[in-house]
Amino acid sequence: MKSRTRDASARAAERRAHADYTGGVYGSMLAASVVVGAGALGAYPRVELAVLLLLTGGVFWVAHVYAQLFGARLAQQPLGRRVTWQVCRDEWPIVKAAVPPAVAVAISPLLGLGVQGAGWLALCVAVAGQVGWSVAAARRAGAGPRMMAAAAAVNLVTGLLIVAFKLVVTH
């Protein structure tokens, strides 16, 4: 029993050591783009925006899993259950990155925000997530403080470009 626990711990440590934050950065950027492009929503705009964020994250996760399995992995190794689950896990941050902006939309009435305020809150949360994922990736890669600050700055500028697009689209 201890051997299995040790093996599971070793596998978990190996996954953490090889963690790829690309999906988190990408998913946060995707969520911000969804908020910008949401446009006119129906009778339940908050629910619709939260569902749109989560569904878009899910659809892009499926697309990335499919592309990894049949684009890259198939040429390198035979497909099996283990490889499929690994790819699903590796791409899961795309979905995880959509959750905080969706939660922001869901709690926006508690903060006294209207629908437009909910969209802005979700956008800010998505940009903050994008910056956070990039700093986490730089830190995991062993980057020093200047490189982590550079990663944060580049992703913040990219996020602010998305905010600028929202300003242009809505005005």
Image: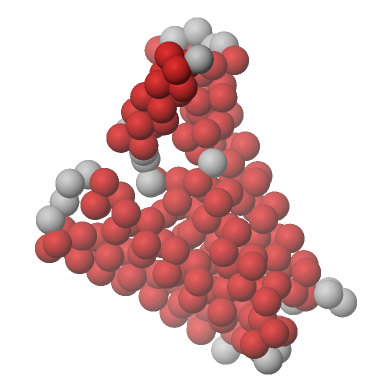
Q: What residue is drawn where x is 78% and y is 69%?
A: 47
Looking at the rendered structure, the number of numbered marks drawn on it comes to 0
Answer yes or no: is residue 116 visible: no
In x, y percent, where is residue 6? 40, 21
Q: Residue furthest right?
A: 43
Q: Is residue 6 left or right of residue 62?
A: left
In x, y percent, where is residue 64? 54, 36
Q: State the image quarter where residue 62 is shown.
A: top right
Q: Is residue 73 left or right of residue 149?
A: right
Q: What residue is drawn where x is 58% and y is 58%?
A: 98
Q: State the image quarter where residue 85 is shown.
A: top right
Q: Nearer the viewer, residue 104 or 55?
A: 104
Q: What residue is drawn where x is 48% and y is 59%?
A: 28
Q: What residue is drawn where x is 17% and y is 46%?
A: 142
Q: Is residue 108 above or below residue 157?
A: below
In x, y percent, where is residue 169? 56, 79
In x, y percent, where is residue 54? 67, 55
Q: Quadrant of the C terminus?
A: bottom right
Q: State the image quarter where residue 106 is shown.
A: bottom right
